[in-house]
Image (spheres, helix red, strand yellow):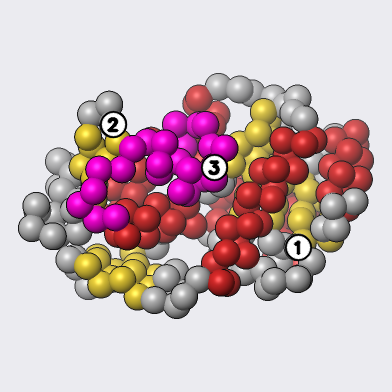
Amino acid sequence: MKSIEPGQQAKILIVDDEPQIIRVLRTALSTQGYAVRIAGNGVEGADIALEWKPDLVITDVSMPEMNGIELCRELRARSDVAIIVLSVRNNERMKIEALDAGADDYVTKPFSIQELQARVRAQLRRNLNETREVQTIISLGDFRIDIPQHRVAVRDSDIHLTPKQFDLLVYFAQHAGKVLTHRALLQAVWGANADQPEYLRVSIGQLRKKIETTEEPRYILTEPWVGYRFRPTGSDDL
């Protein structure tokens, strides 16, 4: 994943076809010290992202030529850049579709600029924290997790995870065998103010599809009404 060095100016790409939204976001983010570029549709946004390599992309859902969901898939196919999706549609299906496509966060219009700035800081802070982590490799049961390289092998086979799936697996591995509440997982992976349980539910489902070999989960167990527990060997023998 591309990381932000301490003291470096973060680069944010805004992809939206609404001039008023663009003006507000560009002003609000520029005054916070971020380098900002604008794209009016998904095709233009994908091209700029490839050339400019932003640290964060903020994209609307409804746009001509390539919508925000398609842009998420395009970006995620070649990059781990943080992505925040904006939409007037506040329903679970749309949120799940955006998260499935690779978005890291979902903000419903209308929103307060203070809330968006906080979500931007949260995404960029995670990138910064990654550069400060002690480089380490977790070898546990059937798993080998190379944190600095963002690589995962399960039963000696490499698997590809999105940034949030990777963060979730690392947190599970660091707390193997323990029951982790929904709130603890949300705060660890999405930040202290995370309050969207569907984010966790979708990411757990996606992660299970990539690491489990049976229909009945062996590694990530559901603790009803509480949370989840990670068994790195697929059994209670840790």
Q: Nearer the viewer, mark 3 or mark 1?
A: 3
Name the residue: 75% across, 25% down: 110
Residue type pointed to by label 2? Val
Q: Is residue 227 visible?
A: yes
Residue 51: give x, y in percent of width and height. 75, 69
Name the residue: 75% across, 63% down: 10
Residue 96: give x, y in percent of width and height. 49, 33
Q: Which mark is residue 10?
A: 1
Q: Quadrant of residue 203?
A: top left
Quadrant where the N terminus is found in the figure: bottom right
Name the residue: 34% across, 64% down: 159
Which residues fall within the magenta stretch? 175-199
Q: Quadrant of residue 204?
A: top left
Q: Which mark is residue 192?
A: 3
Name the residue: 39% across, 52% down: 168
Task: Reply above or below: 99 against 132.
Answer: above
Q: Is residue 6 left or right of residue 14?
A: left
Quadrant where the C terminus is found in the figure: bottom left
Q: How dense is the environment of label 2, judged by Cα within 10 Å: few (below 14), some, or many (20 and up)?
A: few
First along the sequence among labels 3 and 1 = 1
Badge 2 is on which residue? 226
User: In whole angstroms, how far apart are the C-alphas of marks 2 and 3?
Assistant: 18 Å
* Residue 190: in magenta span: yes
Q: Is residue 214 left or right of residue 112?
A: left
Residue type pointed to by label 3? Ala
Compare residues 64 and 62 and report the one nearer the observer: 62
